[in-house]
Amino acid sequence: MAKSSGQKAKLLELARFLLRETDENHPAPLERILRHLESCGISAERKSLYADMEELRLQGLDVVYEKGKSGGYFIGAREFELPEVRLLVDAVQSSRFLTEKKSTQLIEKLSGLVSRHEAKEIHRHVKVVGRIKTMNESIYRNVDAISRAMEEDRQISFSYFEWTAEGEKKFRRGGATYTASPFHLIWDDENYYLIAFDGDKKEKRHFRVDKMARLRVTDTPREGGEALAELDAAAYEKKNFGMYNGREEYVTLLVAEELAGIFYDRFGRLVTRKREGSFEVTVSVAVGPVFYGFLAAFGGGVEILSPALVREEYRALLQGALKGREREE
């Protein structure tokens, strides 16, 4: 029994060593592996290690042996390759909804998916300090509670706040409790949003998860399933610019041809009608200041053709901005 227990410990430590210390550019000679096992209080012989390496291969670990003076054993293919881990690290360090502290913790965990040599390479390019980050550390507990509520088909209750110019939390409704039925979590524009059904107003709404406080799962079953269970979250995200609410409209635009790439990035595949130097397209959007701001960024490159009400609202917004500038001057 003792021999079996020791053998299992040896295989486990051997796997840990190979995963942490080796990669294609850093193979470990057999002598180094033996010294490491001895430093852990595990006795091993060269002959037995050959069998151990084969056992690790049979268990799914890609143990590779490279011949030559600077050769040795190393881990070849991993569950996550270095470019994949870099991609995940980039997403973590650029995500605004993650705090600086949590970003650092997650990057450290992700670095454990590659060898320590590759982890050093990743850390050289990591820049977390100074990035725009959320100040709400409770977002992870919120996401966990919301996910549990959806799994258990329960409503949630919470308070909702905004940040003041002084960096203070200002609770909406004077701190009164919101109650909603959660259905979808969306990551949009570097923020986490919850799409939920508001039982009081009998409509779908969305909330910034990092602005939810004192969130708890209630014992009340969810409502609004018929309205939200089959909601196309991707389409909803596409039409709600920055996830700001607005009335949903089909808007026909005349867009300069050179802006086609931007509109395909924003709306996906489009059905267009070609014109000379431009194209006509109809998109479903949540009409409001954020949508108008998106259009204004392109100057005369985008024109609203219809509906007439949307054209007039856009014109009034631009004229209001110009009047404000004239008063300042």
Image: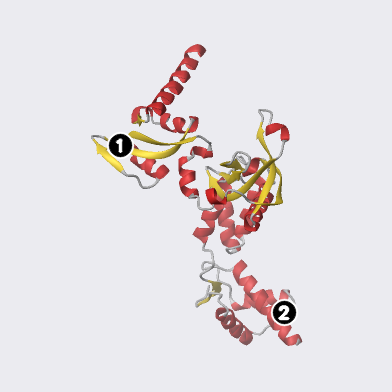
Residue 108, x across and y down, in percent: 64, 56
Can residue 126 be seen here? The reply is no
Residue 109, x across and y down, in percent: 63, 58
Classify the position of the N terminus by image quarter: bottom right
Residue 7, x across and y down, in percent: 69, 83
**Which residue corresponds to the image point at 65% horizontal and 40% vertical from the top-left?**
211
Whether residue 273 is situated above or below residue 78 in the rendered picture? above
Query: What type is the residue that disc 2 sits on?
Result: Ile
Mark 1 Cα shell of 10 Å, populated few (<14), some (14-19), many (≥20): many
Does residue 132 appear to the left or right of 38 in the view shown? Answer: left
Whether residue 258 is situated above or below residue 48 in the rendered picture? above
Q: Quadrant of residue 117?
A: bottom right
Does residue 301 appear to the left or right of 147 in the view shown? Answer: left
Q: Which mark is residue 280?
A: 1
Q: Is label 2 in a helix, a strand or a loop?
A: loop
Residue behind mark 2:
42
Query: What type is the residue that disc 1 sits on?
Result: Glu
User: Front-most of 121 and 323?
Assistant: 323
Residue 21, x across and y down, in percent: 61, 67
Q: Is label 1 in a helix, a strand or a loop?
A: strand
Q: Quadrant of residue 256?
A: top left
User: Front-most of 197 and 92?
Assistant: 197
Mark toward the viewer: 2 or 1? 1
**Which residue corresponds to the image point at 48% horizontal and 38% vertical from the top-left?**
241
Instruction: Decide which of tag 2 and tag 1 comes sooner along the chain.
Output: 2
Q: Quadrant of residue 178?
A: top right
- Gap between marks 2 and 1, in whole Å? 73 Å
Can residue 82 be seen here? The reply is yes
